[in-house]
Amino acid sequence: MTDTTKTIDYYFSVFSPWAFFGDARLRAMAAKHGYSVQYHPQLSPVLFPATGGLALKDRAAPRKAYRMAELERWRKHLGIDINLTPKFFPVPEAPASKLILAALAAGHDVGELVHALGRATWVEERDISDAATLRAIATACGFDGETLITASADESFDKALADEAQAAIDRGVFGYPTYAVGDELFWGQDRLDFLERKLQNA
């Protein structure tokens, strides 16, 4: 049985570069301190308008420029060689997000799948809204990709994804990635040090 007192809730977009930068460190940190990670994929067109955020295309030019500068800084700092302007970004988040939810419903550990989806966008120039691409990624992660693709097409996962968005909004989540332990939120992969202090002192 999962110890809910030792759980990190992880709110993310499948194509967030910041989530991609942080999720391997998150998993290592959780394992080190005996925590489980609960994955909550989100839809930006739902979360952002409800919490005062803007889609990247709608942000002011200085904000876009600073985002690129920060991506470059973190790319160098972490040694993760992402493409700053990937071919397939942005794409609809729902197909990959529903694939993750279908994998969770089947009882799978989705950590590697989530990371592989981020890598597909930011390193491999693959379209994670494409069913064949998702099938291949899931299969490469050791799952039955065809079964998961078929399952994720069920309308129940549309509702599950909407429920995830509302639960995140209700909890005060407004951006990606957000890590939550109990009542405390940590927004951004640059807050992982603070999250670890929380885990150490819990």
Image (cartoon, helix red, strand yellow):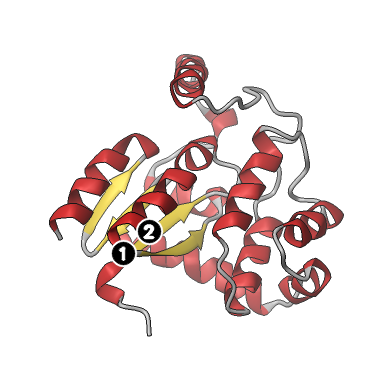
Compare residues 57 and 149 and report the one nearer the observer: 149
Q: Residue at (60%, 43%) from the top-left corner?
A: 15
The answer to whether 76 is drawn above or below residue 50 in the figure is: above
Instruction: Identify the image quadrant of residue 109.
Output: bottom right
Image coords of residue 37 (percent x, y): 41, 63
The residue sitting at the left extreme is 201
Image coords of residue 68 (percent x, y): 52, 18
Residue 159 seen in render? yes
Identify the residue under disc 1.
34
State the SS at label 1. loop
Identify the residue under disc 2.
31
Compare residues 28 and 2 and report the one nearer the observer: 28
The answer to whether 195 is drawn above or below residue 54 in the figure is: below
What amino acid does circle 1 point to? Gly
Compare residues 201 and 97 and report the one nearer the observer: 201
The residue sitting at the front extreme is 32
